[in-house]
Image (cartoon, rainbow, N blue to C red):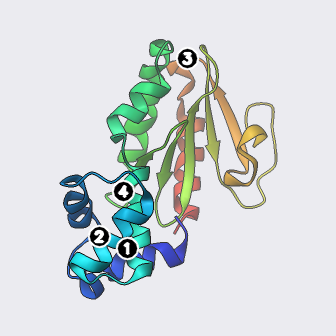
Amino acid sequence: MDKALQTMIDNMPEKTGKSLNEWKKVLKTKSFSKHSEAVNFLKKEHNVTHGFANTIVALSKEEAESPTDLVKNQYEGKENLLPIYESLLAVVKEFGKDVTITPKKTSVSIIRKKQFALIKPATKTRIDLGLKFKDKPITDRLGNSGPFGTMCTHRVKLSNVNEIDSELKKWLKESYQNAK
């Protein structure tokens, strides 16, 4: 999430009287056929400024699917990969309470202050784990970021839960420590 958007969300309770989640609940009580109808509703009925109203409506649409649904959909037909996914989550949760796990449509972002890992079921038999490092050389196992582009600097291909070994855990921890 970009800094300006996060600041807007953080300021929402003070500037609008409600948090983003509270506004989402308000919007769920109504049915709008257009984005602009929901924006106008917030502006006219709740005196929310245009910028906040537009952001609230946009973010409400983005989260139509629950995080559980997003993960379930990613692993549909790839259920054999779930033990790898769950093991990776168990590892990163041990790093501290500042770890945020954010499911998206095709991947799961693992964030501290910045994203430090990305978990994506790449094929029916493989998960790609993206990691972010500064100046770390590419190896046979710790490959280039591939399809992750700039979201990550490196990628590890995982086909078996046993591949989550001490070396991989060390890389995850290093990436986590860099994301402060």
Of badges 1 and 3, nearer the viewer stands 1
Q: Residue at x 75, y 48 (%)?
A: 149
Say few, some or many: other residues with alpha carbon within 10 Å of mark 3 (under 14 / 14 to 19 / 20 or more): some
Q: Badge 4 is on which residue?
A: 60
Asked if one can make out residue 103 in the rendered structure from this viewpoint, the answer is yes
How far, Cα to Cα, is label 2 from label 4? 14 Å
For the residue marked with disc 4, what is the amino acid? Ser
Q: Badge 2 is on which residue?
A: 41
Q: Badge 3 is on which residue?
A: 160
- Residue 142's spot in the image, x, y percent? 73, 38
Say few, some or many: other residues with alpha carbon within 10 Å of mark 4 (under 14 / 14 to 19 / 20 or more): some
Q: Mark 2 or 1 closer to N-term?
A: 2
- Residue 136's spot in the image, x, y percent? 76, 53
Asked which quadrant contains residue 18, the reply is: bottom left
- Label 1 sits on a secondary structure element that is helix
Tell me if label 3 and label 4 are in contact, CB under 8 Å: no
